[in-house]
Amino acid sequence: MADTPAADPAADTATNDRAPKQAPLVLIALILVAAVANLNLAVANVALPDIGKAFDASQSSLNLIAVGYSLGLAASVLYLGALGDRYGRKMMLILGVSLSVPACLLAAAAPNEQVLIAARLLGGISAGMAYPTTLALITALWSGPSRTRSIALWSALGGAISSLGPLVSGALLEHFYWGSVFLITLPLAVLALLLALRFVPAHVNEATDPVDNLGGILSAVLVGGLVLSINFLPIPDQRSMALGLLAIALAAGVGFILRQRRVANPLYDLDVAARRIFWVAACAGIIVFGSLMGAMFIGQQFLQNVLEYDTLSAGAAILPAALLMIVAAPRSAKLVEAKGARFTLLLGYAFCFGGFLTMLLLWNDSAHYGVVALAYALMGVGVGLAGTPASRSLTSSVPVSRAGMASGTADLQRDLGGAIMQSILGAVLTAGYAKSLTAMISTSPNADKVSSSVQAQLTKSFSSAEITAEQYPQYSHQIVEAARQAFVDGQDKAYLAGLAAVVIGAVLVAVLFPKHEAEKAMLQSYLDEDTAAAAAAGAA
């Protein structure tokens, strides 16, 4: 089938409404494939305290274990999405779901933290094969209001399943070892594979142009270097490496832009990316999805380390976010149609701001579950409201021949947003925890008895402090209480960083994203431009 431009401006009509044969089964298959990726994003968080104790891991290593999956996915998603556009989205989807199986098995059997980080990266790359094709196929197979509703379900259920990951993980950890959490997705992967093989069309509006392989490699280096540099920056003896990685990322970014400007068939069409609705929505989505993942990442450690929740209770604490995300997302689709993406995005941002503010002001060592649930509920509503317009604005502002680019960018919203926000919040937490505990040690009556090696072990991570407390039973209570207070001090600084990110995103949307009528006119102009370009290409 020849490529045709997307026909999904905000002024969709019933005559422009299109869906595939056996649409519900196709959509279920695509949502299940996305669910495999989304669950793997979240399952590690609740196990981090147990992993820290098993490997005596530093906080920076725990950050990398948590962010490794997002990093692998974010670094590969554009390139692998383009390969799917060219050689077959269904084929790439099948390969990705299949590769997720050995990645999960390797993570579950990892003998040390280095192998576990590598397994998480591999799992992210497998998701980079499968996940982009889900939204690309929705964009290619549906149009009009049907597309908006399908994206709303895809966004809500994907995010909700991700939020349910900690609950299932917590239940497993009550009875099994930490590696069991990485086996959760195996049955789901098998079911998704069978449904995808049976119901997903083999070829839909795929491109015939060659893939920009060099551009794909540069994009992976750019994302990988940036995220790793953020994670290594708070480690005193790794600052040189962090700065080197940042320099590599900047060089790769410059090379990527130059390459995309000069190559005949760019991996990432910078002219389309420069469309205001596209790039503002991309930035907005990065912040809002990253906020949820960052809050879940730190929150699970807070619940277990500071409030002493067991793993099941800590996992169940996420439920308000999952449930309210499901409730909010369908209403988000209606709000987008009635009031536009700008209004809906800003409303979602307001709830995310409230979530971070609740965490900052009320999450302390005496917090009761009511304030924990309130913060997660606010965050769930915010992401449920903002997720649909963020993803829908991307797919609506590109031609269908660039569906892979739009879906890849939508994936980047979640994965790059999650990787960056988890890395930033994790780095701030790491530095804040170490600084606070160092200050407590220096002012304690027994400061002269604490050797530099013991201090390094105490400030390494909360898990290391607990292990050290067991070695010095006479000071066990003081050590653990100091570590709890230091963790709260560090997380407060992380939540301040989260609040700042939300404010920046809200200002960006308020100033630069068009209002409803202007949005519809702008989307129509994009459609006219793409239709004319397709007609000219066909004539040539």
Image (cartoon, rainbow, N blue to C red):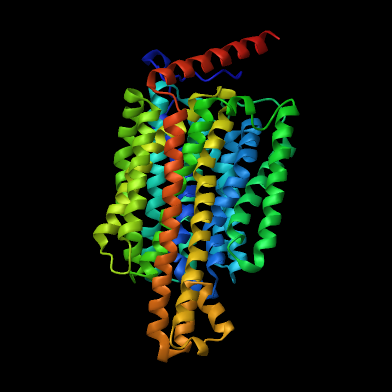
- The image shows residue 505, relative to residue 439, as above or below, that is above
Residue for point 36% across, 32% down: 344
Residue for point 43% across, 87% down: 445
How far across and how far down the image is residue 187, in percent?
A: 46, 54
- The image shows residue 308, relative to residue 190, as above or below, that is below
Q: Nearer the viewer, residue 126 or 392?
A: 392
How far across and how far down the image is residue 474, in percent?
A: 41, 91
| Quarter-of-image position of residue 67 | bottom right
Q: Determine if residue 190 is in view.
A: no
Q: Nearer the viewer, residue 344 or 514?
A: 514
Q: Determine if residue 345 is in view.
A: yes
| Quarter-of-image position of residue 216 | top right
* Residue that protrudes farthest toward the top in the picture: 539
* Residue that protrudes farthest toward the front in the picture: 443
Q: Nearer the viewer, residue 192 or 364?
A: 364
- The image shows residue 20, relative to residue 462, as above or below, that is above
Q: Nearer the viewer, residue 69 or 518?
A: 518
How far across and how far down the image is residue 198, in percent?
A: 49, 37
Please count the marks in the image. 0
The N terminus lies in quadrant: top right
Residue for point 46% across, 71% down: 436
Residue for point 52% across, 86% down: 450
| Quarter-of-image position of residue 159 | top left
The C terminus lies in quadrant: top right
How far across and how far down the image is residue 296, in percent?
A: 41, 56
